[in-house]
Image: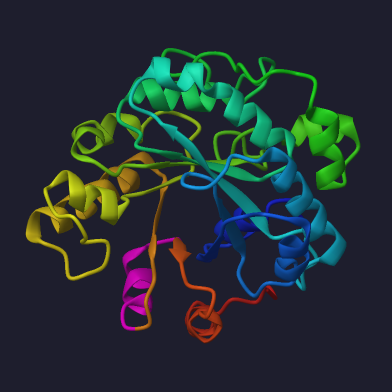
Amino acid sequence: MTRINKAIELLEQGQPVYNISTDGPCFEKGVELAKTWADCINVNLEHHPFDMAALDAFMHGLIAGGPTRSGHRTPTVIVTLPMAAVSEDAVRANSWMINQALTRGVHGLLLCHAETPGAVRAYVESGRFAYMTAGVGEALGIGRRGGGGQDVAAKMWGLPLPEYMERCDVWPLNPKGEIILGIKIENRRALANVEASTRVPGLCFAEWGPGDMGMSFGYPDRHDPPYPPEVWEARNRVFAALKAAGCYFQESGRSETLLDKIKEGVKFLNVGRSGKELIETGRKFTNRTMPW
């Protein structure tokens, strides 16, 4: 094990990352998922209470039930934030959520409805301390993450504080970083700016949010395929923008499409809690050697 963040280690090996989602985090659920066959756990706080005490307990549960078979202290944990990134000001006003979640020792964040490059820039800046200078320039300002909670996060990662402060930057902008930041391009306003938004330094991945994207085109419930042509075109535009920006694409993987998505280059694959056999098919296809 060379990484705190298992997802980064897999991506550096050219391997896909398999995600499962959970809500209602608690200590018992952390213990239950500590040995999960997935690589990454997405804690969905977009539509569930933003309860940092519960998230803290969940992280402690993962540690108590771990380590993973791959030798990592915990699986990668990504929190979906409940803010809508409709503007730079909206993200600045809600940046306390970013600080709170990172203090709990999670390994990544996912920002919903990322509609403008300014909103994405504010998001990245809010996840970095001011001394982190990689990428700072015209496209990215200095970090704004507040100091004071880093000792809590360092203990969650099992690191001495000085080492945590060296490694808690965003990857791949900082090759030594252990935090990954993602966004959702999930409506037509966000789609109009996707090429500029995905070029903001500091991003790792994005998804296209088919349910909300479909709603923005006038469809109440088109979360699952087959998609109308304009919704499918939106998906492909997001994917193309990410490829051009050097970022990774996240999407649901089903049994009938999983291998096609891997061949296409999808690197974050969301699967259901019953998807163990599906994941094993994908791992065998890519000749993966890291245990889950």
Residue drawn 79% across the image and 26% down it:
149
In the image, farthest residue toward the right: 160
Residue drawn 61% across the image and 55% down it:
24
Position in image of residue 271 (x %, y %): 47, 71
- Examine the rendered structure and indicate whether residue 53 appears above or below residue 145: below
User: Which colour assignment does the render follow?
Assistant: rainbow
Residue drawn 34% across the image and 37% down it:
113
Position in image of residue 87 (x %, y %): 35, 21
Q: Is residue 223 left or right of residue 44?
A: left
Q: Is residue 32 left or right of residue 180?
A: right
Q: How many marks?
A: 0
Position in image of residue 44 (x %, y %): 53, 51
Which of the image's four quarters has the N terminus?
bottom right
Please tell me which residue lies in front, 141 or 50. Answer: 50
Residue drawn 50% across the image and 65% down it:
16
Position in image of residue 104 (x %, y %): 73, 39
Which of the image's four quarters has the C terminus?
bottom right
In the image, farthest residue toward the left: 229
The segment highlighted magenta reads 256-267
Q: Is residue 87 visible?
A: yes
Q: Is residue 234 left or right of residue 157?
A: left
- Examine the rendered structure and indicate whether residue 153 appears above or below residue 21: above
- The verdict on residue 40 being magenta is no
Res 171 quadrant in image: top right
- Examine the rendered structure and indicate whether residue 172 appears above or below residue 252: above
Q: Is residue 73 visible?
A: no
- Examine the rendered structure and indicate whether residue 83 appears above or below residue 90: below
- The verdict on residue 266 being magenta is yes
